[in-house]
Image: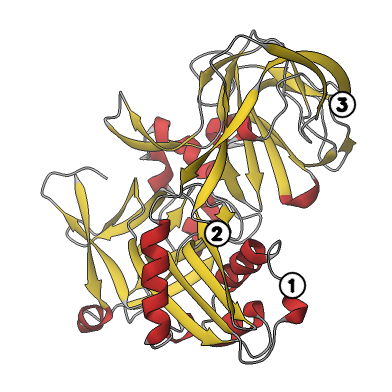
């Protein structure tokens, strides 16, 4: 088994190691990447069949972390596939060969306190002073319903506490805001964030619940159709989406960045939404694949097809047949592996697709229970409010993300007899 440990850049410099952060080039295959770095192509043949399918999960634009010798030889490359797992390519100097593995992404979590005067706007001031665009966007979103930003004055105060995952000295994934406050015109306006990332102006939230009584009422409700429909009809889910799933056979963690639907061979596959076909053909372990680009940065993927019907470059409509269920590629039987991506990041398709098989919005009559609401305290809200008020009295030095460097480096500690 291979273990990773973190060393500082000081130690890496002793070995003459150079850290480089790049982005995966659009259209590049794993084979292309190996060729660019003069890594023998036989590395692909040595990869377990179960792992080869994940080579297709590398998304264009994803950040790749590389480590080189001073002579320019690649020592290690870390390529994320999802938010929890990453492909690792590393050089075994004892045998002078490159090895492959899929390992968990290692990151740290640090809490940051922010107190600053508003000079332009909360969004602009976070960008200018902290250089953390996702944090600026999140604060603007949290306050958008409770604060009129146009009425803020120069000299008003913004304060917040947030947590940030860090990888190689840089932000990894979005920040987690715990509490935020804007003081304007002598009044303090708070936002308390629950575990789901939803902001509230009070330290509690109203939660709906069904009364114990059996009394029911009739009402007309509007069933809103999701922007995405089902990729096929009459299905059974055989494997769900997971960023980090323990593989019972391989005895190690692997991602499953999609949903598997068991279905008979030849079952028609339907486009979950209108869009342009950007890929139609063979894709490694996924076999015959169709990828459709939709609006708002979404891409859907339909793998293991027996026969493809949609051609690259054509436009398809929601519900249109694009292919047929099969077991091409790395597959134990006929099924559809369906993937959904938002701006090149895999997301859980079951949270986005409409299980009513592409039915349009309509008005129905429904019998429902009587719903009441109760106040539920937001976990940690009172404690975070108290902490924030103390921080405002003694403002800390702002942490500037632009000033950070890749001051952490991964090295591989390979035990004797381990297998890549």
Query: On screen, 299 above or below 188?
Result: above
Q: Classify the position of the N terminus by image quarter.
A: top left
Can you give x and y, in whole percent of width and height, for residue 296 in the image?
77, 51
Q: Which residue is mark 3?
A: 361
Q: Secondary structure at mark 1?
A: loop
Of labels 1 and 3, the one closer to you: 1
**For this rendering, which residue is in front, 385 or 3?**
385
Q: Which residue is mark 2?
A: 62
When the figure is inspected, residue 19 is found, relative to residue 199, above or below; the finding is: below
Could you tell which of marks 3 and 2 lies nearer the N-terminus?
2
Q: Earlier in the sequence, mark 1 or mark 3?
A: 1
Q: Nearer the viewer, residue 70 or 122?
A: 122
Label 3, residues with CA under 10 Å away: few <14, some 14-19, many ≥20: few
Instruction: Say if 375 sits above or below 63 in the image.
Output: above
Of callouts 2 and 1, the N-terminal one: 2
In the image, what residue occupies the spot 67% across and 17% down? 325
CA gap, disc 1 to disc 3?
34 Å
Q: Does dot 3 land on a helix, a strand or a loop?
A: loop
Residue 70 in picture, x, y percent from top left? 32, 82
Front label number (2 vs 1)? 1
> Is residue 77 visible to the viewer in this orientation of the structure?
no
For the C terminus, the quadrant is top left
Q: Identify which residue is drawn at 83% across, 34% down.
A: 311
**SS for dot 2:** loop
Callout 2 environment at 10 Å: few (<14), some (14 to 19), or many (20+)? some
Where does the image place residue 333, in percent across and percent down from the top left? 53, 13
Residue in the image at 55% along x and 55% along y: 32
Disc 1 target residue: 148
């Amino acid at each position: 088994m291979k273990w990773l440990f973190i060393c500082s850049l000081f130690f890496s410099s002793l070995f003459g190691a150079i850290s480089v952060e790049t982005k995966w080039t659009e259209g590049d295959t794993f084979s292309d990447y190996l060729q660019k770095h003069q890594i023998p192509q036989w590395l692909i043949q040595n990869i377990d069949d179960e792992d080869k399918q994940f080579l297709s999960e590398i998304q264009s634009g994803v950040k790749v972390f590389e480590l080189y010798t001073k002579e320019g030889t690649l020592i290690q490359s870390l390529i994320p596939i999802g938010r929890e797992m990453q492909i690792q390519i590393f050089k075994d100097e004892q045998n002078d060969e490159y090895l492959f593995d899929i390992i968990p992404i290692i990151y740290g979590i640090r809490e940051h306190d922010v107190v600053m005067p508003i000079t332009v706007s909360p969004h602009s001031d976070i960008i200018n002073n902290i250089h953390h665009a996702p944090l600026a966007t999140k604060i603007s979103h949290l306050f958008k319903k409770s604060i009129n930003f146009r009425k803020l004055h120069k000299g008003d105060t913004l304060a917040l506490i947030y947590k940030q995952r860090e990888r190689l000295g840089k932000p990894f994934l979005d920040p987690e805001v715990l509490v935020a406050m804007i003081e304007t015109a002598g009044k303090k306006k708070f936002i308390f964030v629950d575990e789901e990332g939803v902001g509230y102006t009070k330290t509690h939230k109203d939660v709906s619940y069904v009364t114990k009584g059996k009394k029911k009422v009739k009402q007309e409700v509007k069933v809103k159709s999701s922007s995405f429909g089902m990729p096929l009809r009459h299905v059974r889910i055989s494997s769900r989406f997971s960023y980090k799933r323990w593989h019972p056979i391989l005895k190690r963690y692997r991602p499953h960045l999609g949903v598997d639907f068991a279905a008979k061979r030849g079952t028609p596959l339907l486009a979950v939404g209108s869009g342009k076909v950007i890929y139609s053909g063979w894709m490694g372990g996924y076999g015959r694949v169709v990828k459709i680009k939709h609006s708002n940065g979404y891409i859907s993927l339909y793998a293991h097809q027996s026969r493809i019907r949609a051609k690259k470059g054509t436009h398809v409509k929601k519900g249109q047949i694009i292919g047929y269920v099969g077991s091409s590629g790395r597959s134990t039987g006929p099924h559809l592996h369906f993937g959904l991506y938002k701006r090149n990041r895999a997301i859980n398709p079951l949270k986005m697709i409409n299980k009513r098989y592409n039915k349009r919005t309509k008005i129905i009559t429904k019998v429902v229970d009587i719903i009441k609401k109760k106040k539920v305290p937001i976990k940690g809200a009172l404690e975070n409010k108290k902490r924030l008020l103390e921080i405002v009295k003694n403002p800390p030095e702002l942490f500037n993300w632009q000033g950070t460097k890749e001051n952490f480096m991964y090295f591989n500690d390979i035990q004797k007899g381990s297998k890549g």
